[in-house]
Image: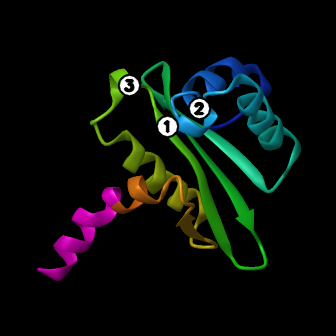
Amino acid sequence: MLIRYKRNYEKIAMGLMSFMPREKDLKKLQETIKLYESNDDWQLYLWKEDDDIVGIIGISIDKDDNSVLLQHVSVNPSHRDQGLGKKMVEQLKKLLDGKYEIIPNKHTRTFFEKCFESDSEEEKL
């Protein structure tokens, strides 16, 4: 289940985001979290599985273009390969209710394409 980021989740969010290669540096990580906290067009969600927060997904909204740029996706390594990243994107789509198209950035593109390549293969059949 996706839950909206709140400041009291900061350490958990930073921990999950630190698994992303471009967010390893503490100063960069703090700047990114601050961006999510201070900019209404940047939204961060946490994925809660049972009682544990095991994933994170972050977006930036471009209202002029009716699109959402997928900025961050990360899953705790001990919960990977279970389809949680794809579930987060699907929940995000439902949350956005068709108002915005989700577009990956250069850092999330490979994940995004891998997530949905099996769907497009099934559509071809």
For label 2, the residue is 17
Nearest to N terminus: mark 3 or mark 2 = 2
Q: Is residue 49 left or right of residue 29?
A: left
Which is the main secondary structure of the residues drawn in magenta?
helix
Residue 107 location (% of width, % of height): 53, 53
Q: Secondary structure at mark 3?
A: helix
Which colour assignment does the render follow? rainbow
For label 3, the residue is 77
Q: Nearer the viewer, residue 114 or 102?
A: 114
Please tell me whether residue 19 is drawn above or below residue 32 in the rendered image: above
Residue 124 covered by magenta stretch: yes
Q: Amino acid at mark 3?
A: Pro
Q: CA distance from mark 3 to mark 2?
A: 12 Å
Please tell me whether residue 73 is drawn above or below residue 106 in the rendered image: above
Can residue 22 be seen in this snapshot?
A: yes
**Residue drawn 65% across the image and 25% down it:** 14
Specify few, some or many for label 1: CA neighbours under 10 Å numbering under 14, 14-19, or 20 or more: many
Magenta range = 114-125
Specify few, some or many for label 2: CA neighbours under 10 Å numbering under 14, 14-19, or 20 or more: many
Q: CA distance from mark 2 to mark 1?
A: 6 Å
**Residue drawn 50% across the image and 54% down it:** 108
Residue 77 location (% of width, % of height): 38, 25
Q: Nearer the viewer, residue 19 or 69?
A: 19
Picture quadrant where residue 119 is located = bottom left
Q: Amino acid at mark 2?
A: Met
Q: Amino acid at mark 1?
A: Ser
For label 1, the residue is 74
Residue 46 location (% of width, % of height): 58, 35
Residue most toward the left? Answer: 125
Can residue 6 be seen in this snapshot?
A: no
Q: CA distance from mark 3 to mark 1?
A: 9 Å
Specify few, some or many for label 3: CA neighbours under 10 Å numbering under 14, 14-19, or 20 or more: few
